[in-house]
Image (cartoon, rainbow, N blue to C red):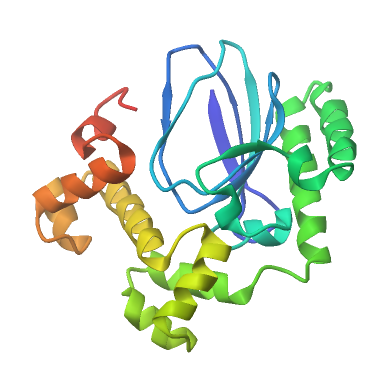
Amino acid sequence: MYREWRAAGVPGAVAWTSVARGDGPVRVLPDGCLDLLWSSRRGLLVAGPDRTAQVSLSVPGERWIGLRLPPGVGPAVFGVPAEELCDSRVPLADLWAGAAAEVVERVGAAVDTTGWPTAGAAVLTDVARDRLRAAGGPDPLGVRVATRLAAGAAVAATAAEVGLGARALHRRSRALFGYGPKTLARILRMRRALDLARAGVPLVEVAVRGGYADQAHLTREVRALAGAPPTRLLAPGGD
């Protein structure tokens, strides 16, 4: 009931759609991203960057369309620093006032068509692309920092590479990602570790390859960020 694909016109963005089956709460892991969302029940929302997992509960049959913006891109689209949206879900109208009404109308027309998922996702993508262009594109610093941290670079080395001191990088990171570079690095490292584990790599090896002290350290970090140990997340049907 869930599918995703690369969104054309917005570098690094992913469009996704789902229909809730009513199986209970869904654990949404932090990823450093901001999302533009449409819900058949709640309308248009903005999902800010999460520091820990959020538990989402949808009613059976609730339809969702989303556009996931990569770390550092969301502030240019939404027009506010990421730290103002951290760990929150807010109506788009709270950010864009009257401009949100036009988006609501466009998405409403799109989801009334027989091809509602792709048509609605195309509207969200077009809106984000136009906003991004009007803003002159994302802050290039965000792309550089997120790329280096996603590749496993240390925060100090990343700061040196982009020519910023520790305090300046922390300040800019809060505006771009919602939190400091160390938190973003922890989240991205967890995502890499879980990807390796899902590919069949044993957890003890995942810990080594991910730069954790040992498997116990990996488990503690995943539990702190995801609210559950990796064994539970990786189990069939796990959250």
Residue 58: % across, % down: 54, 18
Q: Is residue 99 visible?
A: yes
Near-viewer residue (20 or 196) = 20
Quadrant housing residue 136: bottom right
Q: Position of residue 166 (x, y in %)?
A: 40, 80
Please give left or right for residue 188 compared with residue 49 in the image. Answer: left
Residue 189 vs 221, above or below: the answer is: below
- Give the residue displayed 26% in from the left and 44% down from the top: 224
Q: Position of residue 17 (x, y in %)?
A: 62, 31
> Residue placed at 57% from the left, 64% from the top?
176
Q: Quadrant of residue 121?
A: top right
Q: Position of residue 55 (x, y in %)?
A: 43, 28
Residue displayed at 84% across by 27% down:
108
Which quarter of the figure has residue 102? Answer: top right
Q: Quick check: 115 above or below 193?
A: above
Residue 9 visible in the picture: no
Q: Is residue 98 left or right of residue 209?
A: right
Q: Nearer the viewer, residue 5 or 20?
A: 20
Q: How many marks?
A: 0
Residue drawn at point x = 36 percent, y = 54 percent: 187
Q: Quadrant of the C terminus?
A: top left
**Left or right, 149 with reference to 2:** left
Q: Quadrant of the N terminus?
A: top right
